[in-house]
Amino acid sequence: MIFNMLITDNFASFYGQDKEVHIFIDSFDNQKFEMRIGDLEHSKPLGSVIAFTDDELNIKLLALYIRY
C-alpha cells in the first residue's frame, strides 16, 4: 500500500488491493488525521495519527494500515 497524502489535504481515499478495502482519511486541522476502513457504504474507525510533514504523515498512515 502506498500513501501519498499531503498534510495540507483535508481528505483522501485509497483502495487497498491486498485487503480489498477502501481507506478514508480526513483531517480538520491538518495535524490530526483520522483513518477509516471499509467500503463505500460502511466504514469503521481504524485510528488516528498526528503528523507535521508529508513524509511523517505517510509513514504513520502506512504503519496504522499494516496494524489492521
Image (cartoon, rainbow, N blue to C red):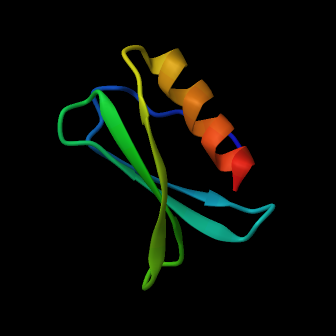
Of all residues shown, which one is farthest toward the bottom? 41
Residue drawn 81% across the image and 61% down it:
18
Residue drawn 65% across the image and 48% down it:
65
- The reply, left or right, for residue 24 in relation to residue 23 is left
> Relative to the observer, which residue lies in front, 27 or 3?
27
Q: Residue 68: horizontal and vertical position, in percent?
A: 69, 56
Q: Residue 42: horizontal and vertical position, in percent?
A: 45, 83
Q: Quadrant of the N terminus?
A: top right
Looking at the picture, does residue 18 appear above or below residue 47?
below
Residue drawn 18% across the image and 42% down it:
28
Looking at the picture, does residue 24 appear above or below residue 43?
above
- The reply, left or right, for residue 27 in relation to residue 47 is left
- The reply, left or right, for residue 1 in relation to residue 54 is right
Looking at the picture, does residue 55 appear above or below residue 1?
above
> Relative to the observer, which residue lies in front, 17 or 43?
43
- The reply, left or right, for residue 7 in relation to residue 47 is left
Of all residues shown, which one is farthest toward the left? 29
Total labels drawn: 0
- Whether residue 65 is visible to the viewer of this picture, yes or no, is yes
> Relative to the observer, which residue lies in front, 47 or 38?
47
- Whether residue 3 is visible to the viewer of this picture, yes or no, is no
Q: Residue 38: horizontal and vertical position, in percent?
A: 55, 73
